[in-house]
Image: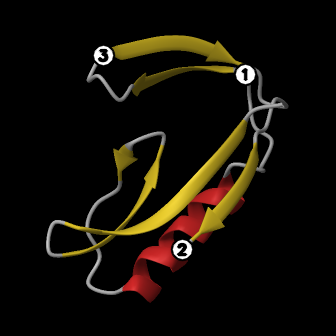
Amino acid sequence: MTKVVYEIVEHDGGWAYRANSVYSETFPSHDAARTAAESVARKQHVSGQTTGIRYEDRDGKWHEEVTKGTDRPETKVVG
């Protein structure tokens, strides 16, 4: 099973969550960034439809994959 860790960090004059070296948008407070990360982490557990996904890795390269709607990662928010 895949594990996704969302880390709350200072970023770009505010706070953000980071997963796999990729930053979220900037939030005005630590609490706001944590709330957003917890929301995203919860959504990772919701089963859905098998669908195509597109994502950017830490090197800026885009990938396309098909993911099963029942294949959900383990998530954790730290910081």
> Mark 2–mark 1 contact, CB under 8 Å?
no
* Front: mark 2 or 1: 2
Q: Position of residue 28 (x, y in %)?
A: 26, 84
Residue visible at 73% across and 21% down in the picture: 50
User: On the image, numbered disc 2 is attached to which residue?
Assistant: 79
* Front: mark 2 or 3: 2
Q: Alpha-carbon distance for marks 1 and 3?
A: 23 Å
Q: Is 12 on the left-hand or right-hand side of 15?
A: left
Location of the N terminus by quadrant is top right
Q: Is 6 on the left-hand or right-hand side of 55?
A: right
Few, some or many residues within 10 Å of mark 3 (<14, 14–19, 20+): few
User: On the image, numbered disc 3 is attached to which residue?
Assistant: 61
Q: Alpha-carbon distance for marks 2 and 3?
A: 27 Å
Q: Position of residue 7 (x, y in %)?
A: 51, 61
Residue visible at 75% across and 33% down in the picture: 2
> Which residue is at the front of the view, 46 or 63?
63
Q: In the orientation shown, which residue stands out farthest toward the left?
A: 13
Q: Dot 3: what SS?
A: loop
User: On the image, numbered disc 1 is attached to which residue?
Assistant: 50
Residue visible at 39% across and 25% down in the picture: 57
